Image (cartoon, rainbow, N blue to C red):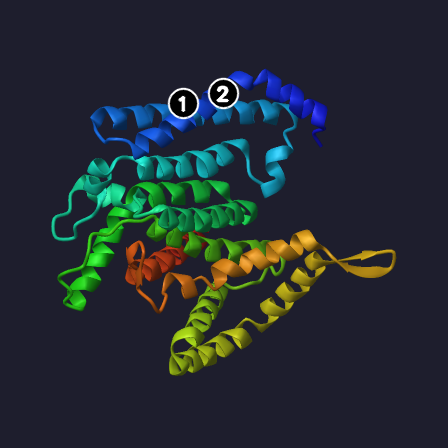
């Protein structure tokens, strides 16, 4: 653990980086509330980069002093921390800080799409509340996935698809459902929630892999359907009683189909949440919190498919949320099936 003297010494050594970062933050703030223009935009991008380099330099110095510090969030390598938890969020924040004359170009007009809006609309946000809510969901999902992923290379490949290719697929999903329901006046779409929903689906898949490895080696791939139906059932109880009862019946069927696996998983969870100390059973609060966080993506449809579709960020694109979650689950699911058959 780092003591106060070490922290003070580290602060003195990095005073110049702290000062540069502080000044950069102030400049960015004043530029975003002042007159907009091309020069302002260039300066915002420049000082955002300077701020990011300053933060990384301070973090790297701290990491050299105690490499265990950043691992409080679990089994995450330094490269993963920098890319997933610094670079991607910084990019989202930078796009949010850009003047409206640029961010407005990023908004996806579904009737007049172009390459720029098809891609950047997924990294643009209506307001600060919209940005923060998506960042919180993203941070939670990435931290959980990186902690339980048994094959990091598969996740890296999935990330390439999520960040670079899936934004273009979001347009096709939206357009498809608008044509089905004959909706013509849908407002321009923006937001990172589609990509976040994709990672939500991937979490469900990777949770299955983690439980198969650690709790029950004979866990069938169809256990994923149990996790999905559980999510649908929780959402249905908030929205429609008849749908809730139907999904509950399906959930019970999947429950009995996976009974052996579920029993083993419950035993595994209990062993993680409770420990014996002085011949007494005590709660492991760290694992208890972690298990609680695992539940959030498993009941996510309540927030992804809300009753009120109109928010401060605009109209919630529920078809994209739902199908992004399904794609996040079944794309690696199909890869798992193909890999199994080739063996």
Q: Measured from the top left, where is residue 18 in percent x and y?
A: 52, 22
Residue 315 x/y as whole percent = 27, 59
Image coordinates of residue 213 in percent, x first then y, are: 59, 54
Name the residue at 43% across, 55% down: 200
Q: Is residue 83 left or right of residue 42?
A: right
295 or 45, which is in the foreground? 45
Q: Residue at x 33, y 52 (%)?
A: 194
* Residue 286, above or below 81: below
In the rendered image, which residue does mark 1 sit on?
50
Disc number lying in front (1 or 2): 2
x 84%, y 61%: residue: 280
Find out whether the residues at labels 1 and 2 contact each other: C-beta distance under 8 Å: no
Mark 1: few/some/many CA within 10 Å (<14, 14-19, 20+): some
Q: Quadrant of residue 236?
A: bottom left
Q: Secondary structure at mark 2?
A: helix
The residue under label 2 is 19
Choose top left, top right, bottom left or bottom right for residue 71: top right
Q: Is residue 204 visible?
A: yes
Closer-to-camera residue (105/320): 105
Q: CA distance from mark 1 to mark 2?
A: 11 Å
| Residue 285 coordinates in the image, percent (x, y) | 69, 54
């Amino acid at each position: 653990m780092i003591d106060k003297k070490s922290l003070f010494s580290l602060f003195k050594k990095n005073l110049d980086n702290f000062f540069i970062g502080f000044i950069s933050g102030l400049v960015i703030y004043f530029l975003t509330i002042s007159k907009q223009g091309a020069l302002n935009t260039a300066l915002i991008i420049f000082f955002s980069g300077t701020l990011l380099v300053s933060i990384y330099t301070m973090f790297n110095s701290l990491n050299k002093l105690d490499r265990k510090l950043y691992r409080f969030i679990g089994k995450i390598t330094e490269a993963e921390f920098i890319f997933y938890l610094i670079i991607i969020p910084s990019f989202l924040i930078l796009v949010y800080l850009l003047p409206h004359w640029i961010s407005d170009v990023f908004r996806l007009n579904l009737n007049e799409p172009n390459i720029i809006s098809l891609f950047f609309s997924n990294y643009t946000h209506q307001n600060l509340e919209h940005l923060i809510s998506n960042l919180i969901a993203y941070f939670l999902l990435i931290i959980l996935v990186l902690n339980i992923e048994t094959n990091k290379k598969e996740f890296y490949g999935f990330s390439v698809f999520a960040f670079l290719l899936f934004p273009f697929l979001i347009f096709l999903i939206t357009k498809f459902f608008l044509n089905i329901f004959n909706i013509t006046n849908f407002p321009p779409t923006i937001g990172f929630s589609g990509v976040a929903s994709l990672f939500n689906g991937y979490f469900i898949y990777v949770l299955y892999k983690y439980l198969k490895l650690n709790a029950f080696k004979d866990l069938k791939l169809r256990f994923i359907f149990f996790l999905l139906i559980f999510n649908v059932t929780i959402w249905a109880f908030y929205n429609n009683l008849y749908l809730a009862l139907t999904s509950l019946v399906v959930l019970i069927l999947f429950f009995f189909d996976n009974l052996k696996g579920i029993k083993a998983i419950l035993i595994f969870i209990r062993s993680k949440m409770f420990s014996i100390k002085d011949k007494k059973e005590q709660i492991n609060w760290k694992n208890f919190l972690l298990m609680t966080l695992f539940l959030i993506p498993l009941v996510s449809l309540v927030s992804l498919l809300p009753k009120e579709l109109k928010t401060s960020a605009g109209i919630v694109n529920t078809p994209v949320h739902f199908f992004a979650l399904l794609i996040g689950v079944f794309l690696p699911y199909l890869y798992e099936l193909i890999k199994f058959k080739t063996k």
